[in-house]
Image (tube, rainbow, N blue to C red):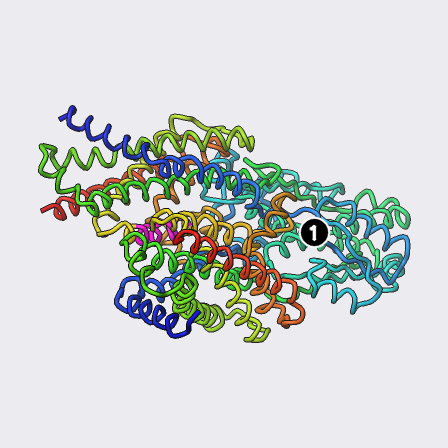
Amino acid sequence: MFARLFQMLIKEFLQVFRDKRTRFVLIGPPTIQMLIFGYAATYEIHNVSLAVLDFDHTQESRELISRFSSSPYFEVTATPEDRHQLAAHLDRGEAVLGIQLHAGFAQRLRKGETASVQVLVDATNSNTALLALGYVNQIAEEFARGYQSDRLARVAPLLAAQAPSIVLDRRPWFNPDLRSQWFFVPGVLGSLTLVIVTLLTAFAVVREREIGTLEQIMVSPIRPAEFILGKTLPFFLIGLADVILIGVLGTLWFGIPFRGSLAVLLAGTMLFLTCMVGVGLFISTVSATQQQAMVTAFFFTMPAITFSGFGFPIHSMPEALQLLTYLDPLRYFLIVLRGSYLKGVGLAELWPQMAAMAAIGTVMLTVSVFRFHKSLD
Amino acid sequence: MRWHRLAAIARKEVIQILRDRRSLFIVVIMPVVLMFLFGYGVSLDLKRIPVCVYDREGSQQSRNLLHRFQGSDYFAVVKAVDNYPELVRAIDTGRCYVGIIIPHDFSQRLATGGPAHVQAVVDATDDNTANLVLGYTEAVVRGFGQEVQLDWLQRKGFAGSGPPLSVESRTWYNENLESQAFIVPGVVAIVMAVIGTFLTSLTIAREWERGTMEQLISTPVTPLEVMAGKLLPYFAIGMFDTALCTSVAIAWFRVPFRGQAVTLFASSALFLVVVLSLGFFFSVVGKSQLAANQASLVTTFLPAFLLSGFLFAIEQMPVPIQIFTRIVPARYYVSLLKDVFLKGSTLGQLRPELFALAVFALALATLATRIFQKRLG
């Protein structure tokens, strides 16, 4: 049996690596996608364009504005003269944020009244808008806190020392600088593996069927079990090699920390690859042509990636969809990946994910092997 | 170019499309499926973030602060622990995103003056969620701190103290800061990019693969007539799909449509020409359905997803990538869609984007025709 299986493996590998295009597909697009994702996929905000309209022209108003312009999050790109100009800057997309300080701003501050800061936000991109507003509030809060304590110190020095206040200590764990790269690079690793392994496995079988060589193989002494193993094992191994290649590349190039255990990640990868090979085989049993296989694979990979938590939090989806994500093997693999890379957690935390992938993999493989047998008869 | 020959080719193509039920189904159903998939799956709005609280004091004041978290829509207190390792575990396993730690001397500090420190431990694996969560946490703690301070000041007879600053923010174009409002219009662009890819790989590459292209060429039709005749029906389907997607966006997802239909129509038509020409180009060069499909996916779908500003703000990308996005047609289409939907921009205001798309459409259509003619000659 092993001799025949070995022959199948050699044939498959030859077929994969003889084709220049397939060879390229294994290395080119994954590398390019990893690089583009690493650089382009970012939720961070820096130097958000800001238009400032200061009607007050006092030391206080200038002080507040300088806090904005010296912050890494904002960049003052325009100083309009009136409200219409300010609005025009936002309309034309030249400024994402507009800040307006009314005349009498400093006067109200000095009298101990509440001075208002008007902020206009282009919320076309609600995420950028929300983050920017968060930073605006933070800067305004720091200014207010400083001003308040200065004023108290002047008016009532004794009280100032006793005034209660609460400070929030921010502790963003695992990714202290809040870098999108750290979030996306392990995610790309998972989604690329999903696409490559499903497509390759599905095509390998469908191609034989389309060209008619499937019958030839079936009349040879190879048994169906050996055929299936011979058809899936190569892609399992290729997937593994791709994970290692992209993983090493992403880690070294982007400097993503790896804090967990390699053994756990390897085990998780193998379980995930089992699921993917199962899915690929399943797709091949429902497709007669490569074109159909491609469309079917597309309909699997799109939702699988979208609902995995790859870039959009599962937590934000409607609840019915959240339930659906439990069927998605990539969901579990991403938790294992990010857990191993960033969180540095091990089997004690990740066993539920491992178990889920093992279950999905077993079901997927059993169903597709069964279907495959039937399609041969 | 003879119109009757062009019409004949178009007629042949329509018959072929109508006969290929599976492809027709894909072309009509896929846009709707993708709209729902991305419309629901891609959301960045956070609600009911799972929080773990560790109240080391258990005083009236610490409970008051924690009540604020319970009362907020953004948080859901799902776990209360009485030791630190348990909090770490809740974060490590991913059960909670945030851990709020109140120190043992919280109310004592508030009574004797000086800042009381509240700690927010956030799982920052997903940097964006962490950033938003920190913003919301900050807002809750700030609100509570301000109240405690004002209360205290008033009790000490320090009259007339409101908070020194109030930030009044107005969000424009997307008043409720819903991520769907900016994601769904962008999805239309993604869908068109995918459809364009599929449509062309279904048409020309198939003709090459089956060898019927040679038959077509031996008839008196000119290459230009073949190309125009083949693309015309798909252009019609594409426009139908645009209408379908836009209807879903407006009627189902309730995205405000503030612009004019003619702007939407013009920009969609231009973008379709771009996508179809690109797909045509690849199917001529690649000659196999598979290669054509792969190439178009990499050149249309991925850039449309990543480099168009659909989700990730272009201004936040590294400068070389920002420059690169200028040659991504989807960038202009996404910007047009968002402006037409949310800002209600008119044709005149959008001239630069429309012009860019027109240049791409013209250049790519010419290129595709040239390559096609050369290939045949």
Q: Percent x, y for residue B374? A: 44, 52
Report the magenta residues as a range: A294-305
Residue at which label 1 appears: A48
Q: Is residue A285 visible?
A: yes
In the rendered structure, which amino acid carries the disc numbered 1?
Val
Q: Percent x, y for residue B265? A: 52, 72
Placement of A340 over or under B366, stated as above or below: above
- Quarter-of-image position of residue A353: top left
Packing grade of label 1 (10 A; few <14, some 14-19, many >=20) is many
Helix, strand or loop: magenta stretch = helix
Q: Percent x, y for residue A145? A: 78, 49
Q: Horizontal placement of B239 versus B202: left or right? A: right
Which is more toward the observer, A350 or B217? B217
What is the secondary structure assignment of the residue under circle 1? strand
Q: Horizontal placement of B369 versus A150: left or right? A: left
Q: Residue furthest top?
A: A3
